[in-house]
Amino acid sequence: ALCRKYPQLKATLFDSAQALEVAREQVEAAGLGERIDFVAGDFLADELPAGYDALLLFNILHGFTPEQNQALLKKAAGALAPGGRIAVLEQLAGAGGSRANRTINGLLAFSFFLTLGGQVYSVEELDGWLQGAGFGHIRRHPLRMSGGSSLVVGEK
């Protein structure tokens, strides 16, 4: 969607080989294959591609432990160019919202724990990890109609 909106944008998708198979199909169907590269890897074991102005971690952190998330965010900071930004999209506990959103977060936390060994983390935990990785000017943007998701942006 970002490449469609910004014709000058080039992107690299980093994810598991399985996830990239699906992504390749969607990118080709959108006619964006020449502007989007694919790198298969493991977020915890492999180095992230480096030198980028922005790094998006969307729905990734809930699958990992706090220690793994701290390490991943430090790795992300190292992969960004000076002045680069990170954008994290996650369900966040304590992010406010309606009773229904808090219930959805609780159910997701239980599901993430059972299926991934992860959980829904708090706003404070994410902010602390980002600060510990060297990010500043951290801002949270709650997303409406999302069941408690927030976009959190930090600057290197």
Image (cartoon, helix red, strand yellow):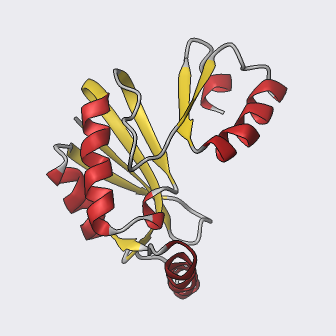
The answer to which of 79 and 130 lies nearer the viewer is 79
- Residue 62 x/y as whole percent: 46, 66
- Residue 90 x/y as whole percent: 47, 61
Question: Does 125 sit left or right of 62 as displayed?
Answer: left
As drawn, 15 above or below 82:
below
As drawn, 134 above or below 69:
above
Question: Does 147 sit left or right of 33 as displayed?
Answer: left
- Residue 43 x/y as whole percent: 43, 47
The answer to which of 105 and 77 lies nearer the viewer is 77
As drawn, 83 above or below 112:
above
Picture quadrant of residue 93: bottom left
Picture quadrant of residue 146: bottom right
Q: Quadrant of the N terminus?
A: top right
The residue at the point 25 percent across, 33 percent down is 78
Picture quadrant of residue 6: top right
The residue at the point 37 percent across, 72 percent down is 121
Residue extending furthest toward the right: 29
Residue extending furthest toward the front: 45
The answer to which of 80 and 38 lies nearer the viewer is 38
